[in-house]
Amino acid sequence: MLASWSGIHELKTLGNIELNGMPIQLNQKPLFCGFYLNELLMRLLHKEDPHPALFELYHQSLCLLEKNNSIPVVLRLFEKKLLDELGYGLPLKKEAKTREKIQPDCFYQYEHQHGFILCEKSNAQNIFSGVDLIAMAEEKLDNDAILQTAKRLTRTAIQYLLGNKKLNSREFF
């Protein structure tokens, strides 16, 4: 829908409203994923802060969900691009301390304030392989292992922004 409104503070007056194409039809799991995208936007964006590129991404993601395209890929790319748009993009190409390129045969610890720091292999939640980080940087989320890594990383980064707030839509999964 296209809508316009005017006013100051919280109280607005609706001006015009009209359909902008056919409504998107989401059912079952894609519907719950749409709730998740909505909740991310509501929780992470500031009121009245325009993000035209982000809302275009949101619309494209909903269209892909409607077509039942690879749901995990749609969600992970939305999360990654949301973080970029908000200024908290994941520095997936360079190591934080040395500024050297991420190496596929190394492991990196993710620190929110700094980025990825070279480390020893570990099973810790915030340790990621270089090969997975490179795949994420290139948006090549073409296997389950990379998708799981992407989910773990984007959730870690998003949770940092949310603080102790909980996303209710995650209860559907």
Image (spheres, helix red, strand yellow):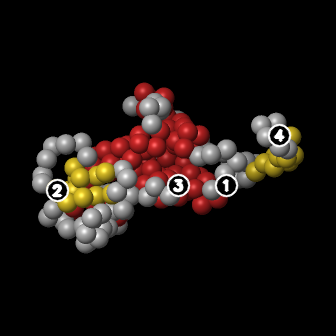
According to the picture, the residue beneath numbered tag 2 turns out to be 119
Q: Amino acid at mark 4?
A: Lys
Residue at disc 2, secondary structure: strand
Q: Amino acid at mark 3?
A: Leu
Question: For mark 4, does the 10 Å Cα neighbourhood hold few (<14), some (14 to 19), or many (20 or more) residues?
Answer: few
| Front-lying residue, 123 or 60 | 123
Mark nearer the N terminus (1 vs 3): 1
According to the picture, the residue beneath numbered tag 1 turns out to be 50
Q: CA distance from mark 2 to mark 4?
A: 52 Å
According to the picture, the residue beneath numbered tag 3 turns out to be 86
Query: For the point 85% across and 44% down, which residue is it?
Result: 7
Q: CA distance from mark 1 to mark 3?
A: 11 Å
Q: Is residue 151 visible?
A: no
Q: State left or right for residue 6 relative to residue 68.
A: right
Whether tag 1 and tag 4 are in contact, CB under 8 A, the answer is no
Query: For the point 30% across and 63% down, which residue is it?
Result: 96
Camera-side mark, 2 or 4 = 2
Please give the count of numbered marks on the rendered protein: 4
According to the picture, the residue beneath numbered tag 4 turns out to be 12
Q: CA distance from mark 3 to mark 2?
A: 28 Å
